[in-house]
Image (cartoon, grey):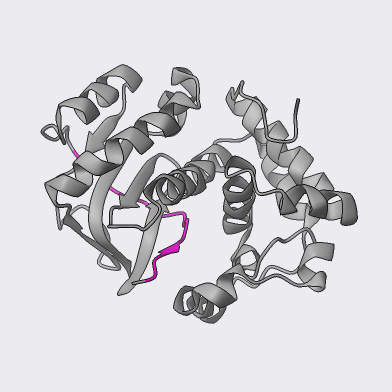
Amino acid sequence: MLRFLIALGLLIPSFGYAYECNKEIDQLSKTYQIQIICKENKNSFYESISYKRSRQYLIDDVYPYLKKFLLGYDKSVVKNNINELVLAENVKLKGKDVGGLSNGSKIIICLDDYSNKEYTYLFILNHEFSSNILYNASYENRVAWREVSTLYDNTYEYLVLNLNSFDFSRQTSEKLLNDGLLTNYSATNKENDFNVYAEKVFSGEKVLYRYKNQYPKVAKKLKLFKQIYREAGYTGKFPDET
C-alpha cells in the first residue's frame, strides 16, 4: 500500500513516558533526551488521526535507520526540535494512509515492510523533522521562505488529490519550478514545500542541484533552506558542499 507524507500544524497532546520500545531504542531516547514511544494510545490524537502499536519486529528493524538519522545532527538540534517521536503502524489522517506526521515538536513515523527500508525511513524522518526545524525558525526566515513562491493551493481538495495519488504528488512542471516549487505536493502549503526540499537535500538527489542552476527561485529557496538549518544548529555538510 502506498503511503504518503504530510506535515501539518497539528496540536498533538503529550504522552507520558512510555515503556521501552526495545533496549537499543530506549538507549537512543536517553542519549538524545527525547521520548521515543511505541505504545498505542487511542486518546492521544484528534479523531482525524489514528494509528496502531507496531509489531515488535518492525520496531527492531527501524533501529539502525533511526540511529543513523539521529547521528546526522548534534544532540542539541534534536533535543530542541523533537519532544516525542512515536513509532507506529497504520498511521492514518482522515482515513488516508500517511508515512508520517509532525506538529513542530512531535513526530509520528509509520513503520512497515518497505522494500528499501534505509532510504524510506531516512526519507520520512528527514521529511517530518524538517517541519519542526521550520516551525522553530526565526520569524524572518519563515516569512522569507513563504514569500518566495506564489502558487500555493491551500485547499483541502488539492491536498486530498495529492494524498490520493502518489504519482501526481511527486510530479513537477516548468510552472512550479519557475516558482521555486519542486513537486505538486510542494504546492499544498509552505511547510510541505520545505519538507520536499529536505527530502531531496538529505537523500542527495542530484536533480535538485540541476534545478538550482536552471531556476533562480529554486536557488533562492535552497539557500534559505540551508540558512534555516544552520540557524537551528545543523553543522553537517550539505550534498553540494565540498
Depth order, front residue of 124/19: 124
What secondary structure do most residues of the magenta stretch adopt? Answer: loop
Relative to 59, 104 lies left or right: right
Residue 242 lies, in percent from the top left, at 76, 25
236 drawn magenta: no
At a point 68% along the width and 35% down the height, the residue shown is 239
At a point 50% along the width and 43% down the height, the residue shown is 126
Residue 50, quarter of picture:
bottom left
At a point 45% along the width and 79% down the height, the residue shown is 164
Residue 113 lies, in percent from the top left, at 28, 57
Work out whether 206 lies above or below 31: below
Does the rendering let one see residue 94? no
Residue 223 lies, in percent from the top left, at 78, 39
Which contiguous range is marked in magenta? Answer: 2-15
Residue 78, quarter of picture:
top left
Work out whether 60 lies above or below 218: above
Depth order, front residue of 73/158: 73
Work out whether 161 lies above or below 75: below
Quadrant of image for the N terminus: bottom left
Residue 24 lies, in percent from the top left, at 21, 26
Residue 80, quarter of picture:
top left
Depth order, front residue of 239/218: 239
Give the number of marks. Answer: 0
Relative to 30, 133 lies left or right: right
Relative to 214, 147 lies left or right: left
Does the rendering let one see residue 117? yes
Depth order, front residue of 81/91: 91
